[in-house]
Image (tube, helix red, strand yellow):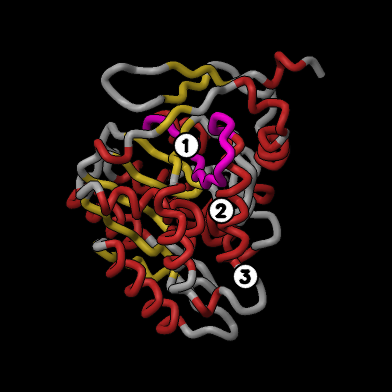
Amino acid sequence: MPKRIFRILNSYIVRAGPYRFITKRYFGTNNITLTSRILEIESFRHDVVPQRLPVASCKSILLLAPHQDDEVVGAGGTLALARDAGVEISIVYCTDGQQNDVESEVRRKESQNVCKRLGAKMFELNISNLKPKPEKKDLENLNEIIHTVNPDVILCPWLFDGAPKHRMINHILWLANKLARLPDIEIWGYQVQNTLLPNGFVDITSVADEKRALLECFPSQNVDRHYDHLAMGLAAWNSRLLSKSAAPAFVEIFFTLPARELMKLIDRFYFEDIEITYAGEPTITANLKELHQSITKKEL
């Protein structure tokens, strides 16, 4: 297929704010899996030139974490820089984090330690991680947090992240927006499990050791699979976006755009086939269908 078919994203710099992402054309498909695979292709990186994100100029940042450690894997260095700049940080842990071999209280204590190190306010929705069934009260709680914190920026997993529970966070954010419209602010989609097509980045080299220390605050997650090692490897690989330098560097990357544009993309790609969106997670699929219908009065 001609490369031009895949050029759906046109971007521009706004003097009054950070780098923004405006969708002009799509891939000609609503299939979320196909779209995510296309965006991972390295050759398309040159279609969009990532810009440095103005972390220090923010007054308040709110991060939505599907699980306890996702916030550090995707944006630990960015949060550390924000803390050092005096930015108010709030973190919402959306699931209780419980696993078959790890109790939720263990993960809560680990996340409390991280929030203490970051000077962050900690919020919890406590959606079950083993049997996720978000309810209308969770959307109302999320709306209350957002409008109370009144952040300049919301950080959440990239909308094409492959993990179903990570996509669930974007879906409940979309539903929360249906109940009470989000402020006209920036959304920065952070990287967890996918290679995303970034239009924004943060050089975290100066706080790389702090990011590693934050990752090590989650020993329950670094037993069989060392996410601390994997996350630092991602940040090292992302440094290819910087100008050439002899010194090792670390970078966190983001898909940034106004909230209203994120809502449009979620609408287009998540709901065409909800079975594909939450492939491999029939419980999430069924429960999100039910919640979606109760809020929108439309079936998926």
Q: Give the range drawn in magenta.
A: 241-258
Amino acid, disc 1: Phe
Q: In which quarter of the image is residue 34?
A: top right
Sequence-earlier tag: 2 or 1: 2
| Residue 156 inside the magenta-drawn segment | no
Disc 3 to disc 1, how far (Cα)?
Answer: 24 Å
Sequence-earlier tag: 3 or 2: 2
Q: Decide if residue 65 is on the left or right side of residue 88.
A: right
Asked which secondary structure carries label 2, the reply is loop
- Seen at 44% across and 34% down, the residue is 256
Outermost residue, right side: 1
Task: Tell me the number on the disc at residue 201.
Answer: 1
Task: Tell me the number on the disc at residue 231.
Answer: none
Q: Is residue 233 above or below residue 226?
A: above
Dots 3, 1 in contact, CB < 8 A:
no
Query: How far from the left and from the top, in percent, is residue 188?
Result: 42, 40
| Residue 247 inside the magenta-drawn segment | yes
- Seen at 24% across and 36% down, the residue is 57
Instruction: Give the residue pinned by disc 2.
Output: 192
Amino acid, disc 3: His
Asked which secondary structure carries label 1, the reply is strand
Q: Which sits in the foreground, 14 or 216?
A: 216
Instruction: Give the residue pinned by disc 3.
Output: 226
Sequence-earlier tag: 3 or 1: 1
Query: How far from the left and from the top, in percent, is residue 179?
Result: 30, 45
Q: How would you rate the neighbour count of disc 2 (Cα within 10 Å): few for under 14, some for 14-19, many for 20 or more?
A: many
Q: In this view, does 288 lie above or below 106?
A: above
